Image: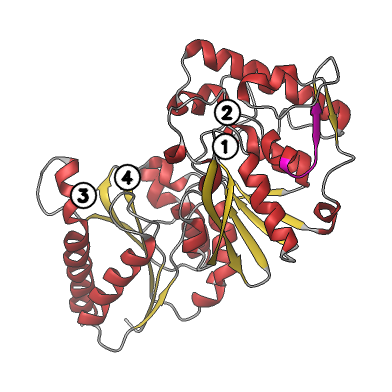
Amino acid sequence: MHKIVIAPDSFKGTLSSFEVCEIIKKAASAVYPKIDCRCVPVADGGEGTVDALGASHINIKVTGPHFESSDSYYGRLGDTAVIELATAAGLPMTDPLNPEKTTTYGVGELIKDALDRGFRKFIIALGGSSTNDCGCGMAAALGVRFTDKDGNAFIPVGGTLSDVAKIDMSGIDMRIAESDFQTMCDIDNPLYGENGASYVFAPQKGADKDAVLRLDSGLRSIAGIIKRDIGTDVSVLPGAGAAGGCGAGTVAFLSSVLKRGIDVVLDIAKFEDMLDSCDAVITGEGKFDSQSVFGKAISGIANRTKKKNIPLIVFCGCAEETDISYEMGVSAVFSIQRKAMPMEKAMKYNASGLYKTAYNVFSLLKSVKK
């Protein structure tokens, strides 16, 4: 082997995508001392996107998910601001969990600070939210006015979306119209209904069955107000349900384009150019299953390597691959676990297991080549 591209996601809870890259690179170099390793740490739009893109941090104080003052940051990537929703309204920031009361207001404050610093290009990563407010908090921080039936202005949260009677866009920050927004969105869930934001994602944010019904009703209501007052129909938009409806919110309030997160990352990294004269691409993630090739990071990588007939090797903590994985471009899948043990214990050995597995795979490829 002369050249490989290493493009893994993180092994959540143990290894960052940067660490995975370095371990695989070390193993490849031990077997092939002169090998050219091109590293592309990737993310699909969830937590860690700013770092995966290699963006530098801009630290500021924002309004947290419970309207408290909170430390946050966004990324500077050349002339582009990378806004990671999870740094202002993320699930780990929320105690107690209650999507009826949490807000994305801080996300709007991140955008406003970036506008103040001169940014006009934005990437918004939606993963890891604690909210179900359709991005209305974000919009309110940028000057959008929401009023109830009595004309009283308020900042909507998941539990009060049904109280919105009117949306006034006249006060929105004028610089929004001058800016270009891309939203990293790796799900196709609609805004509401049985496959929508509330039914599918709100339970993991703390909603019980009754709360799910109320939240879903609120999203149905706000979709109608958005269509009437803004002229944008988000009711059947694929991906609108991402981050508690914030996918719909970025489209309605920011005129953003929803794109698969991995495609944004690979385009920025100029991944296609890296594939020239490439012998293989190495990727990986904590758990590999059928969902890995439907919208997640590996699917975007497989889509590009398959077109160029480049082998794609997957390393993972545990594997539940199916035939569809290979049909969509995966060449081989290797679990890094060296022996059977409980997952909690096995995760402690991910670094050593990954190195040994990668070393063995590269050694096998070298012997076959001979």
Q: Quick one: quadrant of the N terminus?
A: bottom left
> Mark 3 is on which residue type?
Met
Q: Nearer the observer, disc 3 or disc 4?
A: 3
Q: Is residue 214 left or right of residue 287?
A: right
Q: Which residues are magenta?
A: 141-146
Q: CA distance from mark 2 to mark 4?
A: 27 Å
Q: In the image, residue 76 lies at what x, y percent?
A: 60, 67
State the residue in front, 344 or 153.
153
Looking at the rendered image, the disc whose residue lies closer to the viewer, 4 or 1, is 1
- Marks 2 and 4: CB-CB under 8 Å? no
Pointer 1 residue:
243
Q: Residue at point 77% right, 39% down?
A: 252
Q: Quadrant of the C terminus?
A: bottom left
Give the structural element (helix, strand or loop) at label 1.
helix
Quadrant position of residue 223 = top right
What distance separates the C-alpha of mark 3 from that of mark 2?
30 Å
Say which amino acid is labelled 4.
Glu
The residue wearing badge 4 is: 321
Secondary element under disc 3, as helix, strand or loop, is helix
Is 142 included in the stretch rendered in magenta? yes
> In the displayed structure, does residue 335 sit left or right of residue 254?
left
* Residue tagged 2: 197
Residue linked to disc 3: 347
Location of residue 141 in the rendering, given as x and y in whole percent from the top left corner = 72, 42
Name the residue type under label 1. Ala
Residue 195 makes an appearance in the image: no
Q: Looking at numbered disc 2 in the image, what kind of residue is underneath it?
A: Ala
Mark 2 neighbour class, 10 Å CA radius: few under 14, some 14 to 19, many 20 or more: many
Judging depth in this view, the residue of 139 and 263 nearest the camera is: 139
Which is more N-terminal, label 2 or label 3? Answer: 2
**Farthest front residue?**
69
Would you say 100 lies left or right of 114 here? left
